[in-house]
Amino acid sequence: MSTNFKKSLIQWSNDHKRSLPWQNTKNPYFIWLREVILQQTRVEQGANYYKSFIEKYPNVENLATASLEDVYKSWEGLGYYSRAKNLHETAKIIHEQLNDIFPNQYEAILKLKGIGEYTAAAIASFAYDLPYATLDGNTYRVLSRYFGIEIPIDTTEGKKYFKQVANECLDTHQPAQYNQALIDLGATICKPKNPQCDHCPLSSNCVAYNNNNIEQLPIKSKKIIIQERFLNFLLIHINEHIFIQQRKEKDIWQHLFQFPLVETLENETISESFLSHYYSGNFQILEESEIYTQILTHRKIKAKFWEVKVSNFQAPKDWLLVPFEQIKKFSYPKIIRDYLSIRYNYIY
DNA sequence: AAGACGGGGGC
DNA sequence: GCCCCAGTCTT
């Protein structure tokens, strides 16, 4: 049964290669870059970032010697920005401590920042043909359906169980081809919604297919809760310059730049006296924007932009007064970029 | 063990 | 709206 699984899968993959920018590379640096970019990210979204990254940073030394801000800017729009930070840190370690040579053992790869079990297994198998099964959203889905596994995948028990199943199924003689095939099948045939079971090489032995409960698997036990946040961004222009600040909070958009921010509760609004109390200076509100909404996985952001004039003002230390033409050099959250493109015709 | 972390797309 | 995506880190 397991042999049949492998054979059908690999045979299918030989006839259904996707054409992607990283085809056939064995370069561990490229594979690492690709895998980090694709963490929780669709192939279609990540492909162009991958292309621009290998162009801007063709090897680990280029990435290591680039500034962190440069890497953030290159990452802008991709989300989960801690990936960019960890990528840069790890590049520096490989460059400065490992003589530009990527580790070639699973345990050593796993120790690197930003590399968890999935990415370590991916690099180990794709770059070095080591026998580690990649366990990602695709493989959870295929395995849970094929074997009819109803243990929730978002629990410790589930993860442990699926890891065991995944490694038992792994074709240890060709781990790279096998892992790639399983991922491709999950991405193109065994999709979350509307799976193409008609074209699936594994359907005849698929427990969920035969039980007619494909769409019920895999099972997740936790529900996503969405919280709202209300953000007021202050646009303070002074002589063709404008204030921005870099986020320091260890929360959403850490390290990214933004216009000076006042966060409020839902019913609260900001007023001139509110601002004058909040900061030292006399504020005059010139214009209040409509509400811009951005829905994220765990968060709903409602943002307002306030054109504000200020006098007798001592700016907080972490505010930067930058020439307005140069604001595009900094890395911003999407909601700010949206505003800039609408209000000021900046093309992002 | 549970939360936090983005943005894009399918339906 | 809700769910998912080539997951990882912190608490």
Image (cartoon, coloured by chain):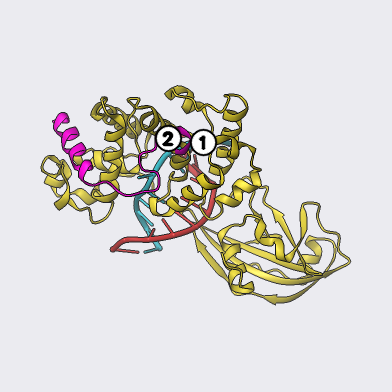
Chain colours: A yellow, B red, C cyan
Q: Which mark is residue A119?
A: 2
Asked if the residues shown at circle 1 and circle 2 are in contact, with their CB atoms under 8 angstroms apart, the answer is yes
When the figure is inspected, residue A51 is found, relative to residue A59, above or below; the finding is: below
SS class, disc 2 = helix
Q: Is residue A127 left or right of residue A198?
A: right
Q: What residue is at 18 percent from the left and 49 percent from the top?
A: A213
On the image, the x and y values in percent for residue A3 come to: 15, 29
Which chain does the numbered disc 2 sit on?
A
Q: Where A287 falls versus A213 (above or below)?
A: below
Q: Residue under label 1, please give it.
A: A114
Q: Nearer the viewer, residue C10 or B1?
A: C10
Asked which secondary structure carries label 1, the reply is loop
Disc 1 crowd, CA 10 A, few/some/many (<14, 14-19, 20+): some
The number of callouts visible is 2
Q: Position of residue A85 (x, y in %)?
A: 59, 41
Q: In terms of depth relative to the viewer, which is nearer, A139 or A184?
A: A184
At 20% from the left and 45% from the top, the residue drawn is A15
